[in-house]
Image (cartoon, grey):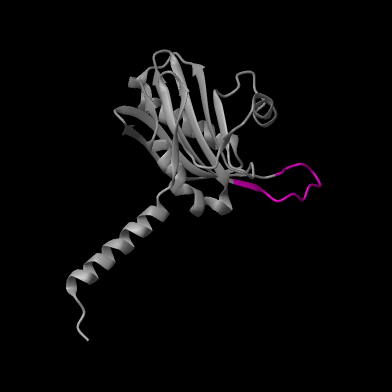
Amino acid sequence: MKTNPLLLRLAALLLVLTLAAFSSPKLTKTTITKNLAVGVPRGFVPLPDDGIAAKYPAARRPLAVFTDPSGRIDFSVAQKPTTFNDRDYGLLLKIYKASIQNMYSKVQFLGEDIRTINKRDFIMLEFVSTVNDTRRGSNLAPIRKYQLVQYAIQGDQLFVFTFDAPADEQAQWQPTAQAVMKSIMMK
């Protein structure tokens, strides 16, 4: 029996398209402010104000937090005043990296860069953080998280975009985190 080369090519193309459809994260364009939109993973829901206050206790709460149905994976957008401008990104990359290293017991950086997305520059830090419980007599296991953080300055405001997931789920969520960060649109 002879196989038709055109039929083989079509089958291969169909296989590639099917794999691409299942492997690319599905995002829903979501408006955060009138000048900011981002692709949020399908199935993620906005955390209500009381949920944000409980999960992110701070004087300045995030603009928005989206979480998966289990509540273990989050994407947040925060905004705060800054005296820096976008010409300071090289310096800020060093400052934020050092700040992250001081925040956790251990940090394994997977990437650090200044990148352009949708005609806007962002500082990007991707890492796995570990927090050890150092209290005397404690035997709690360390908490490990995969995080992808991007920073952007617009006028006198610093925007911080953070995607975090348990470190043992990094392989599953890393492509989604990267797709979310590449979808950010700031006017």
Give the quarter of the figure containing the C terminus.
top left
Left or right: 185 with respect to 66? left
Image coordinates for residue 115, horizontal then vertical, percent: 33, 34
Q: Residue at position x 32%, y 57% from top? A: 17
Q: Which residues are magenta?
A: 133-144
Image coordinates for residue 174, horizontal then vertical, percent: 47, 48
Is residue 31 part of the magenta span, yes or no? no
Q: Nearer the viewer, residue 164 or 39?
A: 39
Give the quarter of the figure containing the N terminus.
bottom left
Q: Residue at position x 54%, y 37% from top? A: 101
Q: Residue at position x 41%, y 25% from top? A: 152
Q: Nearer the viewer, residue 158 or 50?
A: 50
With respect to residue 39, does 80 lie above or below? Answer: above
Q: Nearer the viewer, residue 49 or 6?
A: 6
Q: Nearer the viewer, residue 136 or 164?
A: 164
Image coordinates for residue 15, horizontal then vertical, percent: 33, 64
- What is the residue that sits farthest to the bottom in this orientation? 1
Magenta region, mostly helix, strand or loop?
loop
With respect to residue 78, does 183 lie above or below? Answer: below
Q: How many marks?
A: 0
- Which quadrant would residue 45 be assigned to in this image? top right
With respect to residue 1, does 178 lie above or below? Answer: above
Q: Residue at position x 41%, y 16% from top? A: 84
